[in-house]
Image (cartoon, coloured by chain):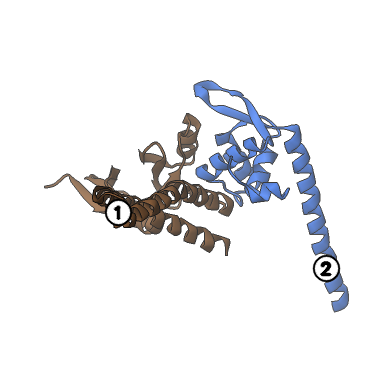
Amino acid sequence: MPRNDALENGELTDTSYYILLSLVEPKHGYLIMNTVEQMTDKRIQIGPASMYTTIKKLSAASLIKLYGEGEKKKKTYVITEKGRKMLESEIERKREMVRHGEEILLQLKEMGS
Amino acid sequence: MRKTKYIGSGGLAFDEEKDMERLSKYASKGWILEKFAFLGFKLRKGPSESVDYSVAYESDPDEDYFAYFEAAGWKHVCSTGNYIHIFSAPKNTTPIYTDKASIVDKYEKEKRKMADIAFPTLIFMAILFILDSLSNLSWVSDVVGTISLGLACLTLIVLVFTGLPYFGYQYKIYKLRK
C-alpha cells in the first residue's frame, strides 16, 4: 500500500482535499479534474499522474470507494463516511488556521491606528 | 536518408529531466520518440513537433490510467515493462505530476524497487567473495573459488544497475523534501 505521511497525520494535501470535495457526488477521474479546475478558477490543477496516484491512495485509506464502472469500464468513485468525517475535520482545521491569521492581522491594524 | 535514430539515455534515475528536454529538442527537429531502446530511445523522422515529454511510473495501469492522461491532453508515446510510461503533450500543458506528495511517491516507489533487488544482490555478492577467499584454504576446491569470483562479477553488474539508481532516487527525494 502506498505510504502517505499526510494522510496518516490526519492532514490532507490540497490535491486530496479537492478530490474529496468533488467526490461528494460520484464521478469519474476525468470529471474530477474538470470539477476542481472550475471550483478553484484554475488555481488548482491536478495532473493525470497525480490524479491517478492520489485516487489510489484515498481508496487504500478508505476515504473514497469505487462507485461503479460506467461505459468503457470507466471507474467512478464516491466519498465514504470516513472520507466525509476527514473532510469535516480538515475544514475545521483550516477554519481555525484562517481565524488565527485574521486575529493577528486585526491586532496589527489596531496597533497601527 | 535514415528514418530512425538511436540516442542514449543518461539513466532515468539521474537524468530524467535532461533526457526529456533532449527528446523535446529532437522532436522540434523532426525526430519523434518512437520507443524505448536498450539504454536509450529510438526516434523516427517525421514532421517537427513542439512538445514536452514526461515520464510516469505505474505497474499494470488500468484503462482509466491512460484515459486520465488523454483527457488532460497527454498522448501516450511508449512504455517499457508495462511499468515506465512516456507521454507527450503540446508545450505548457498542465504537468502530469502537480503536487509534491505524488512526485515524492513516484521516486519512493522507484527507490524501493531498486532496493528490493540491490540489497539481496549485495548480500549474495558478499557471500560469493567470502567463498572466493575461502577457496584459498586447502579444504575448499579452487573451482569453487573461480566460479564464485565469476558470479561475483555478474552480481556486481546487477548491483551497479540497481544500486546507483537507488542513490539517484534517494537524492531526488532528499532534494524535494528539503
Along the line of sight, the residue nearer the viewer: B119 or B161: B119
Residue positioned 54% across, 45% down in the render: A50
**Residue B99 position within the rendered picture, expressed as x and y whole percent measured from the top left:** 57, 52
The residue indicated by pointer 2 is: A104
Residue B142 placement, left or right of A50: left
Q: Quadrant of the C terminus of chain B?
A: bottom right
Residue B106 % position (x, y): 50, 48
**Image point (77%, 53%), residue name:** A94
Instruction: Say if residue A28 shows up in the picture.
Output: yes
Chain A hue?
blue
Label 2 marks a residue whose chain is A
Viewer-nearest residue: B139 or A52:
B139
Q: Residues within 10 Å of mark 2 (few under 14, many from 20)?
A: few
Q: CA distance from mark 2 to mark 1?
A: 75 Å
Mark on residue A96? none
Question: Under tag 2, what secondary structure?
Answer: helix
Check the image and report above or below for B36 versus B136. above
Which residue has dot 1 on it?
A: B135
Q: Chain of mark 1?
A: B
The residue positioned 88% from the left and 73% from the top of the image is A110
The colour of chain B is brown
Q: Are marks 2 and 1 on the same chain?
A: no
**Place of residue A83 in the rendered image (x, y in percent of width and height, measured from the top left):** 73, 37
The residue type indicated by label 1 comes to: Ser
Instruction: Residue at 39%, 51% (x, y): give it.
Output: B127
Farthest residue, direction left: B1
Describe the element under mark 1 as helix, strand or loop. Answer: loop
